[in-house]
Image (cartoon, rainbow, N blue to C red):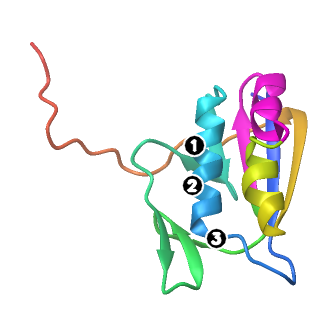
Amino acid sequence: MLEDGVIVTLSDNAQSQIDIYDILQLLNELKLAGAEAISINGIRIVNTTDVALINNSYIKIDDNRLNSPYIVKAIGDPVKLESGLMQKDSGYVDKIINAMDKTAIVERNDNILIPKYDGKMTTKYIEMGE
């Protein structure tokens, strides 16, 4: 089912590269703005998703190696998501991306499809009630 939300495209440019901190900050900002589901380059992000920088050269999400551009899709109220990212001087795009000469494109979209999580969810400390 297609949903409303935003698509954020983060791209490397000649002056600087998107790094893991840019990705992590974007995920946090989207969650704070009310995102109900998020994916990066088609990989569903859940609370147990492992986002890591490997050898200072590439970003890995779970077992998937990613390269720029990073296409981040978020389902939620597109106005809230976009405004949360685009606040002048304090939003993600101005404060994090533009300040470091990086490139981000934020666009509202009403045809977003985020795949279901296909990994295994394991719990270590939760006990099933009776």
Q: Residues within 10 Å of mark 1 (few under 14, many from 20)?
A: few
Q: Amino acid at mark 1?
A: Asn
Count of marks overlaid on the render: 3
Q: What segment is highlighted magenta in the picture? A: 71-88
Whole-number angstrom distance, CA of label 2 to CA of label 3 = 9 Å
Whole-number angstrom distance, CA of label 1 to CA of label 2 = 6 Å
Q: Amino acid at mark 3?
A: Asp
Disc number for residue 19: 3
Q: Residues within 10 Å of mark 2 (few under 14, many from 20)?
A: few
Front in this rendered view, residue 88 or 39:
88
Left or right of 76 on screen, residue 102: right
Q: Who comes first in sequence, dot 3 or dot 1?
A: 3
82 is within the stretch colored magenta:
yes
86 is within the stretch colored magenta:
yes
Disc number for residue 44: none
Give the residue number, with chain letter if any, for mark 1: 28
Give the residue number, with chain letter if any, for mark 2: 24
Quadrant in the rendering for residue 47: top left
Quadrant in the rendering for residue 23: bottom right
Picture residue at 77% right of the left edge, 24% below the top = 80
Q: Residues within 10 Å of mark 3 (few under 14, many from 20)?
A: some
Picture residue at 89% right of the left edge, 35% below the top = 108
SS assignment at label 1: helix
Compared with 91, 130 (above or below) is above
Tell me the quadrant of the picture where the C terminus can be found: top left
Q: Who comes first in sequence, dot 2 or dot 3?
A: 3
SS assignment at label 2: helix
Q: Amino acid at mark 2?
A: Leu
Q: Is residue 22 visible?
A: yes
Picture residue at 75% right of the left edge, 51% below the top = 95
On the image, the x and y values in percent for residue 46 come to: 48, 43
Compared with 78, 100 (above or below) is below
